[in-house]
Image: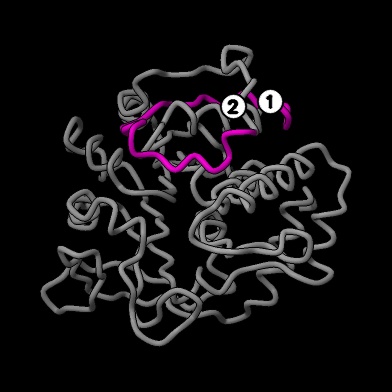
Amino acid sequence: MNKIPVILDTDIGTDIDDTWALIMLINSPELDVKLITTVSGDTIYRAKIIAKILKIAGKKIPIGIGIGDPKNSLNFQEPFVRDFDINSYEGEIYEDGIQAMVDLIKNSEEPITIVSIGPATNIAKAIEIYPDLPKKCNFVGMHGSIYKGYGGKDGRDPEANVKSDVLSLRRVFSSNFISKLITPLDTCGLVFLDGERYKKIYNSEKPILKALIENYKIWAKLVTWTKVDSENHSSTLFDTVAVYLAYSHEFLEIEPIKIKVTDDGYTVPDEKGDEILVAIRWKDLNAFLDHLVERLMGEE
């Protein structure tokens, strides 16, 4: 099987779903993860979470530190890495994650898929540095809200990754990537694990899943915008859908939609907008949830 080369760009450490997505990513045999970059807020803190999780998983994937501002960072998983020495990570760590991304893409002989599960800041900057970057990449993002908002409610919301950096997402959407595909809240906002699916993860003795649940419990105590019962169900696992779309569309309906990104972070269908492929509704959400559990458990 020819693996798909992938870069993950993530704001891991604020919402917990990035952590679930990271573990799904490294357990997906279809993907060859070339680089993981951090974006927004305290990007060194975010890199420490990635490094510790990869170390537990026995991986040495390169990590790139991206654009952020430590003064404006919601570090809800900080206790997990409080005593972790990032220099103990045996993989490469690039202080300039943007340049690492550019160099990797520039030197690649095959297209690379960028999986974006945070604000588009790093990717827009990489395009500024290397304008031909989109021609060599597929873009998959967890961005937007087309017809449904948070919690599956009717009506769109200004989705967090969009609202955090509108200008960068506009640049990405207007660029000539080989393909541009997003999962908006319409689909990714419906994903969570409970019942037997959740218990399988929660009760696992696998070190990587024990680390996942440790992070989730820490996050559940510190997060300020929601209350969750970490004993019985996950929070919404938005970002796992973007990882899935990097290698399969089987369980989702994909439609091309022309989208305008408004100044206040809405993604509005508009004939004058940029055409984006959108995973707009589920064909089989239950099948995806079963697949997600299998991936998290490391069962192909």
Q: Dividing the picture into quarters, in which one does residue 89 lie? A: top right
Element type where label 2 sits in the image:
helix
Identify the amino acid type marked 2.
Ala
The vertical placement of 260 against 122, above or below, is below
Q: Residue at x 49, y 80 (%)?
A: 152
Asked whether the beta carbons under mark 1 and mark 2 sit within 8 Å of each other, the answer is: yes
Q: Residues within 10 Å of mark 1 (few under 14, many from 20)?
A: some
Magenta span has 72? yes
Is 200 situated left or right of 52 in this image?
right
Q: Residue at x 57, y 82 (%)?
A: 283
Q: Return the x and y of residue 51 as percentages of the image width and height.
A: 59, 26
Front position in the image: 65 or 179: 65
State which region is magenta: 56-79
Is 259 situated left or right of 285 in this image?
left
Magenta span has 210? no
Q: Residue at x 60, y 64 (%)?
A: 227
Is 23 situated left or right of 139 in this image?
right
Q: Return the x and y of residue 59 as percentages of the image width and height.
A: 67, 27
Q: Dividing the picture into quarters, in which one does residue 3 lie? A: top right
On the image, numbered disc 2 is attached to which residue?
Answer: 51
Q: Dividing the picture into quarters, in which one does residue 244 lie? A: bottom right
Element type where label 1 sits in the image:
helix
Q: Residues within 10 Å of mark 2 (few under 14, many from 20)?
A: many
Q: Residue at x 21, y 55 (%)?
A: 166
Which numbered disc covers residue 55?
Answer: 1
Is 75 situated left or right of 295 in this image?
left
For the residues labelled 1 and 2, the Cα–Cα distance comes to 6 Å
The vertical placement of 70 against 6, above or below, is above
Identify the amino acid type marked 1.
Lys
